[in-house]
């Protein structure tokens, strides 16, 4: 008995649901003029947007990381290390793989790139930050704002002279570029080739920013990774120059001592002691200098090995590939979106009317 009642309730509920669906269908069908009109208006708006929307240009630069396996040099460096000599050949591994891609997207590198000087369309020097402001017509929006109206990012101006307003604008630029325009990725993990993609509505800015970002990061990367090797080489060069001076002095001392003991009575050996000591100094300094020269040459080879660390493979070439918002796409998307919103609006209006009864 209870099962029959339950089945009847289910049949009634399903029947009511179908009736409600038909009711809503006929209601929306009766409002077809409004839905079609909304679709037409939306399609026209989408078409208009496709004409107004500027094309997006993509600048792509690919580079390879230098293989750090030293081969024969690694054996020499290992031999030097066994004697307690650190030539700096093993440092710099902090910027590899994903760490390097994050370095490209860091605020420090992006801001330094924005402050670099490039030629504009007329060949005049301009910073990329100023070019970005010009392309996005920010100065028109800054009219009536005294702090922003006179704001400029002039070429070759030190970062220390910037105000808080400069820092704020650079921060906005960085957010815009890092979120929507800049992409750095290693497309294949098996191959150490990384690609930089810069998207912008200005073709010249996309190309110049992409190239200058690669140069900025490359310079920083080389300086950081070879810093230890350069410091060691500088120390060895100073030590070599110092020992060479000592050796020259010792050689001169031997010559002077020999002159003073010329035709000296062979029985007076005490007078020959300064000359003997000088000769010992010459031999010791010669041995030290020989070893230092070897170490210095190894250090120079190590420093050369560290540079360059980033080898550019492909650079962006004008004209850049561009992506337009197509007219057909604007028409279809605009019409569909407007029609959907019209249907949604009609449903909400009818529900409110039913609740009011």
Image (tube, grey):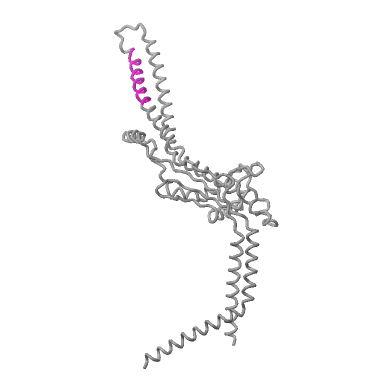
Q: Nearer the viewer, residue 194 or 325?
A: 325
Which stretch is magenta?
Answer: 271-290
Q: Nearer the viewer, residue 48 or 227?
A: 48
Q: Choose top left, top right, bottom left or bottom right for residue 208.
A: top right
**In this rendering, would 131 be left or right of 109?**
right
Residue 217 horizontal/vertical position (percent): 50, 44
User: Looking at the image, how many numbered discs can be counted on the residues?
Assistant: 0
In the image, residue 289 lies in the stretch drawn in magenta:
yes
State whether residue 16 is above or below residue 333. below
Q: Is residue 128 above or below residue 35?
A: above
* Quarter of the figure with the N terminus: bottom left
Residue 225: percent from the left, percent from the top?
44, 41
The image position of residue 317, as x and y in percent, is 56, 44
> Any magenta on residue 129?
no
Relative horizontal placement of residue 159, taking residue 9 as reference (left or right):
right
The quarter of the picture where residue 44 lies is bottom right
Residue at the farthest left position:
267
- Residue 336, image x, y percentages: 58, 68
Would you say 185 lies left or right of 281 here?
right
In terms of secondary structure, what is the magenta stretch mainly? helix
Residue placed farthest to the right in the image? 144
Q: Quadrant of the C terminus?
A: bottom right
In-front residue for pair 223/267:
223
Q: Residue at x 64, y 51 (%)?
A: 135
Q: Residue furthest bottom?
A: 1
Q: Is residue 25 above or below residue 6?
A: above
Q: Is residue 339 left or right of residue 272?
A: right
């Amino acid at each position: 008995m209870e099962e029959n009642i339950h089945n009847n309730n289910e049949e009634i509920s399903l029947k009511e649901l179908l009736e409600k669906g038909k009711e809503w269908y006929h209601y929306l069908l009766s409002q077809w003029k409004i839905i079609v009109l909304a679709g037409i208006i939306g399609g026209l708006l989408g078409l208009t947007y496709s004409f107004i929307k500027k094309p997006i240009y993509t600048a792509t630069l690919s580079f390879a990381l230098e293989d750090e396996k030293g081969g024969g040099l690694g054996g020499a460096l290992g031999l030097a290390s066994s004697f307690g000599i650190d030539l700096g050949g093993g440092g710099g591994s902090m910027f590899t793989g994903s760490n390097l891609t994050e370095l490209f997207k860091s605020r420090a590198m992006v801001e330094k790139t924005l402050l670099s000087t490039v030629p504009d369309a007329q060949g005049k020097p301009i910073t990329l930050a100023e070019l970005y402001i010009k392309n996005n017509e920010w100065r028109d929006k800054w009219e009536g704002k005294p702090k922003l109206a006179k704001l400029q990012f002039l070429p070759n101006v030190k970062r220390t002279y910037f105000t808080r307003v400069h820092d704020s604008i650079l921060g906005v630029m960085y957010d815009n570029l890092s979120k929507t325009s800049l992409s750095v990725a290693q497309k294949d993990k098996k191959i150490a080739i990384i690609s930089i993609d810069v998207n912008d509505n200005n073709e010249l800015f996309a190309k110049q920013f992409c190239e200058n970002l690669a140069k900025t990061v490359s310079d920083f990367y080389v300086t950081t990774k070879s810093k230890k090797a350069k410091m060691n080489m500088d120390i060895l060069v100073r030590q070599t120059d110092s020992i060479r001076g000592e050796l020259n002095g010792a050689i001169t001392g031997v010559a002077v001592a020999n002159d003073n003991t010329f035709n000296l009575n062979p029985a007076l050996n005490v007078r020959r002691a300064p000359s003997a000591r000088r000769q010992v100094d010459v031999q010791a300094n010669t041995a030290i200098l020989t070893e230092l020269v070897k170490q210095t040459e190894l250090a120079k080879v190590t420093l050369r090995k560290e540079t360059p660390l980033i080898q550019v493979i492909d650079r962006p070439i004008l004209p850049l590939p561009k992506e337009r918002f197509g007219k057909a796409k604007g028409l279809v998307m605009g019409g569909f979106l407007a029609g959907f919103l019209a249907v949604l609006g009609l449903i909400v209006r009818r529900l409110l009317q039913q609740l009011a009864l």
